[in-house]
Amino acid sequence: MKALHMATFTLVLVGALNWGLVGLFNFNLVTALLGGLGLETIAYILVGLSAVYVGVTHMNDCKICSAKKG
């Protein structure tokens, strides 16, 4: 499960950084890297699914939030 958590967390960070680049500089890193390969849509789907996973499992994975729970 740790590998899944690390992979999803990394994808969420990549997605957040990409949105920051889009907002600040109108530069889409995902499109720049994957647009020509036809993998851009898959990358966005994986980032979205990762965000859902991180959101659902956050309370169990976060040391601060899990300490408040108990």
Image: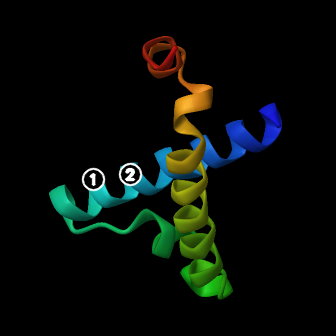
Residue 45 coordinates in the image, percent (x, y): 59, 75
From the viewer's perspective, tell me whether residue 52 is left or right of residue 3.
Answer: left
Identify the residue under disc 2.
16
Residue 12 coordinates in the image, percent (x, y): 51, 50
Classify 10 Å Cα crowding around label 2: few (below 14), some (14-19), many (20 and above). Answer: some
Image quarter hosting the N terminus: top right
Classify 10 Å Cα crowding around label 1: few (below 14), some (14-19), many (20 and above). Answer: some
Report if the CB atoms under discs 1 and 2 are less than 8 Å apart: yes
Secondary structure, mark 2, is helix
Report the residue at 61% width, 29% height from top. Answer: 60
Report the residue at 63% width, 67% height from top. Answer: 46
- Total residue callouts: 2
Identify the residue under disc 1.
20
Against 61, residue 1 (above or below) is below
Report the residue at 55% width, 82% height from top. Answer: 35
Q: Amino acid at mark 2?
A: Ala
From the viewer's perspective, tell me whether residue 33 is left or right of residue 39.
Answer: left
Q: Depth check: give the residue in front, 58 or 5.
A: 58
Secondary structure, mark 1, is helix
Residue 13 coordinates in the image, percent (x, y): 48, 44
Residue 10 coordinates in the image, percent (x, y): 60, 43
Q: Depth check: give the residue in front, 18 or 47.
A: 47
Gap in angstroms between the C-alphas marked 1 and 2 = 6 Å
Checking the image for residue 62, the label placed there is none
Instruction: Indicate the colouring scheme.
Output: rainbow
Where is residue 4, by image quadrant? Answer: top right
Q: Amino acid at mark 1?
A: Gly
